[in-house]
Amino acid sequence: MASYSQKTYAQRGKEHTHPLVKELFATMERKQSNLSLAADVSTKAELLALADTAGPYICVLKTHIDVVADFDADLVQQLQALAAKHDFLIFEDRKFADIGNTVKLQYGGGIYRIADWAHITNCHVIPGEGIIQGLAEVGMPKGRGLLLLAEMSSVGMLATSAYTDKNVEMAIANDFVIGFIGSRRFTEERDLITMTPGVGLHASGDALGQQYRTPTKIITENGSDIIIVGRGIYGPGKDAATEAQRYREAGWTAYLNRLGLK
Ligand code: 6AU
């Protein structure tokens, strides 16, 4: 059987059984985009402006909602309106890491009520499989999906070898898991997606351990599905609309090259 990374996003969407992943692949195909924007800005106005500017070029908006100083319920409503206007999904990069019972409370409640509006969220499996079960109890009935942090992009990260393999095992065994954060395709057992952060066309890293690889490396060579780009798009001196278009083009070209279509 051909690797999933040799199939088109459209084909994978058709064959997939998870409605959210079907929707994600269909969005990617419609917009010809495998770009997710990491919108790490600290005010409501900045986040909404960035989502509106980059919205036409992305398949997924990734948020860190707890860095927004003036967060309120209206921000969520406006983000949802932008998601509808520009046709993208929302991924709250919460990186849950506690026992099942606690993450249930954190995911469904509190100020942010993440499960009410984020199509996708992610977690570390350091506490064991209970974290997935706890999150699934809240997210499954709402049609949400979970990514496991099988690897990280930073210097000296500890998610390697046996730990990464455990992530893959747990992902295969749990229907609520739709894929991974990591640098490559991890399994052919079922069609689990990979979203990759630490992607840049020019910079090699930052002062705090972030490391950047190119879309070609990540998509064409490593078989990942979606590139996550933050400061490469909105960093100092950058025009977010121009950069979002550039990264969309780079990510899509890398995908076509992988399929041998370009
Ligand atoms: O492009 P950057 O470096 O400005 O932003 C990268 C984004 C940030 C990180 O919180 C996130 O990607 N990230 C993650 C995610 C997505 O879970 C994991 C990781 O290993 N490295 C990483 O940078 O919002």
Image (cartoon, grey):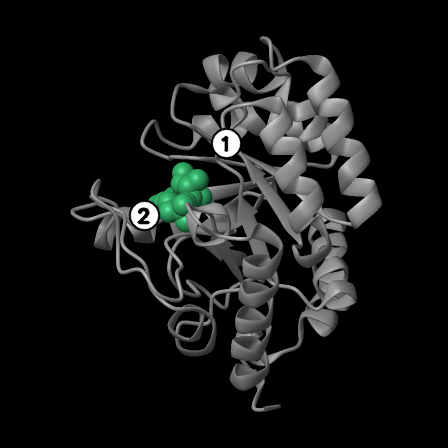
**Drawn side of residue 88 relative to residue 226, left or right:** right
In the depicted structure, whether residue 199 falls above or below residue 99 = below
Can you give x and y, in whole percent of width and height, for residue 155 in the image? 19, 49
Along the line of sight, which residue is nearer the eye, 47 or 120? 47
Residue depicted at 56% across the width and 67% down the height: 246
- Disc 1/disc 2 C-alpha distance (Å): 21 Å
Name the residue tied to disc 1. Answer: 41
Q: Secondary structure at mark 1?
A: loop
Q: Residue lying farthest left? A: 156
In the depicted structure, whether residue 222 falls above or below residue 38 = below
**Residue 62 in view:** yes
Can you give x and y, in whole percent of width and height, for residue 35 in the image? 58, 58
Residue depicted at 76% across the width and 41% down the height: 83
Ligand number 1: quarter of image: top left
Q: Give the residue type that dot 1 points to.
A: Val
Residue depicted at 50% across the width and 30% down the height: 64
Q: Residue lying farthest top? A: 110
Q: Secondary structure at mark 2?
A: loop
Residue depicted at 79% across the width and 50% down the height: 87
**Residue 123's quadrant in the figure?**
top left
* Mark 1 closeness class: few <14, some 14–19, many ≥20 residues within 10 Å: many
| Residues at circles 1 and 2 in contact by the CB criterion of under 8 Å | no
Q: Quadrant of the N terminus?
A: bottom right
Q: Quadrant of the C terminus?
A: bottom right
Name the residue tied to disc 2. Answer: 152
